[in-house]
Amino acid sequence: MIIILNRRRWPVAVAWTAVPLALVLATCLGDPVVRPSTVAAALLDPGHPLHPAVREVRLPRAVLGCLAGAGLGVSGLLLQDVLRNPIAGPELLGVSSGAAVVTVTIVVLGLAVPVALLPYAALGGALVAGALVLLAIGRTRSPDHVALVGAAVSAACGGLVVAVVGLGTQGNVVVLFRYLLGSLAARGWTHVEAVAPWLLLGVLAAVLLARRVEALALGDDVAAGLGVAVVRTRLAAVAVAAALAAAVASVCGPVAFVALLAPHLARRVVGRVGTRPVLVAVVPIGAALLAAADLVSRLVLYPVEVPVGVATTLVGVPALVLTLRGRAPVTAGRA
């Protein structure tokens, strides 16, 4: 394993450099396009004419995209390895959609819930939806079965979102797009502060669970023989994955397919060496994926902005089809 990790050190390092690159591009590109030196000057000088645009609009959006992408990547990795299913993810288990139902209900009905408490409320919806899927699939780990049940629960949650938005005013159309497709538009430091503690604690919990999750990926009998509490570890990992996805959905909506793609790309980078080393790569890859997708969604049809979930879905759907056909880059759980 040490030899494999040494061979993969440079690709992992490159993956980490993608995060600051994504931040630089996100703050430089737009209307107007500015140089990195100008961005630095605008950040440091409150009197600079571009200070509000860079400091209060572009930078928090880019930071939120990186944090959310990293959280989704870790969430997908935990679910894929703990369920031994290469297409497991918060969107395919209904977790993201369940969180969106609760969040959009709070927003549309104008309930007095502070932004800082949104992740707590979203977690409830995420856990309910995830529990329904897990109960429905039972003991099977068939990718097709999981995908069908997850799609059914997600569709039901999507219908609830539409119904709730229908109770509001015409101005809630923006909310509909946000919580059906995911969006990072009009996000500021308040949203970053609301989700950052959840995402940081979730990643830390994933690090602490990684050794046991890695054992589960080898099979329940093998994990039990290694002294791992199978049921408790699986429940803990699913809960952490749900909390990460719920935190993201509470402020960004259900951004699809980042959680599916990031673990597969990370395994490509580090090789088939288990949960712990893949975790090192999935954090920057997930962050860079969502930040890049948001940049594309913001610029591709400028001045019209496309929801970031559209960009991630256009890439994620073909990847899902290839995975179901048995052409996934690396299957979770094969060390």
Image (spheres, helix red, strand yellow):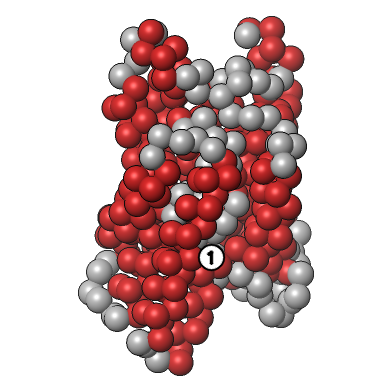
Whether 56 is drawn above or below 15: the answer is: below
Total numbered labels: 1
Q: In the displayed structure, does residue 110 sit left or right of residue 290?
A: left
Residue 7 percent location from the top left of the image: 74, 15
Q: Which residue is mark 1?
A: 182
Whether 307 is drawn above or below 291: the answer is: below
Residue at screen point 51% across, 18% down: 218
Residue 269 percent location from the top left of the image: 71, 28
Whether 136 is drawn above or below 298: the answer is: above
Q: How many C-alpha atoms fall within 10 Å of the one at disc 1: few (<14), some, or many (≥20)?
A: many
Q: Is residue 273 visible?
A: yes
* Quadrant assignment for the C terminus: top right
Residue at screen point 70% across, 49% down: 321
Q: Is residue 253 visible?
A: no
Whether 74 is drawn above or below 57: the answer is: above
Regarding mark 1 in the picture, which secondary structure is present there?
A: loop
Q: In the displayed structure, does residue 94 sit left or right of residue 51?
A: left
In terms of image quadrants, where is residue 162? bottom left
Q: Amino acid at mark 1?
A: Gly
* Farthest left residue in view: 112
Residue 262 percent location from the top left of the image: 62, 41
In terms of image quadrants, where is residue 99? bottom left
Residue at screen point 52% across, 45% down: 145
* Farthest bottom residue in view: 170
* Front one among 84 and 278: 84
* Front one among 245 and 18: 245
Residue at screen point 27% across, 67% down: 114
Residue 83 percent location from the top left of the image: 47, 33
* Front one among 203 and 253: 253
Q: In the displayed structure, does residue 145 sit left or right of residue 5?
A: left
* Quadrant assignment for the N terminus: top right
